[in-house]
Amino acid sequence: MGYYEIFQSDKNGQWYFHLKAGNHEIILASQGYVSKAGAENGVNSVNENCVDDDNYERLVAKDGSFYFNLKAGNGQVIGTSEMYTTKQMRDKGIESVKRNGGSDAPK
């Protein structure tokens, strides 16, 4: 079962969240937020948007690595994945977010 980790950066004071799989690997990382409440709203947005495949933007980095963004209905990026070496691994990452990011995931 996946879970969320909300934390404040020592470097810039901003708040972030990670969605982690049951094995504690980060499967989705957020942008920075000014407040903890903003990060919590980001978590709620993941919960609402992670199940719809249309909300995933499948991308290729300049170095040929594969990654994805999870977007909200308004097109704003909610979170970004790690880099993967193959499309298949990226797609498994998306499936992991769908499984682990639902509203039942602990915060």
Image (cartoon, helix red, strand yellow):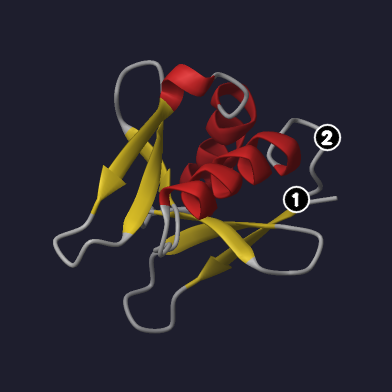
Crowding near the residue tagged with mark 2, few <14, some 14–19, many ≥20 C-alpha atoms within 10 Å? few
Residue on which the image places disc 1: 107
User: Would you identify the image quadrant in which residue 95 lies?
Assistant: top right
The one nearer the camera, 54 or 7, is: 54
Q: Residue 39: image x %, image y %?
A: 51, 48
Q: Residue at x 21, y 57 (%)?
A: 61
The kind of residue tagged 2 is Asp
Q: Residue 87: image x %, image y %?
A: 42, 48
The kind of residue tagged 1 is Lys
The one nearer the camera, 50 or 41, is: 50
Q: Residue at x 68, y 39 (%)?
A: 101
Q: Residue at x 56, y 34 (%)?
A: 46
Task: Say above or below: 64 vs 67.
Answer: below
User: Would you identify the image quadrant in which residue 49 lies?
Assistant: top right
Task: Say above or below: 24 vs 57.
Answer: below
* Extreme-left residue of the structure: 62
- Label disc, if present, on residue 104 of the rendered structure: 2
Q: Residue 23: image x %, image y %?
A: 79, 68
Q: Residue 57: image x %, image y %?
A: 34, 33
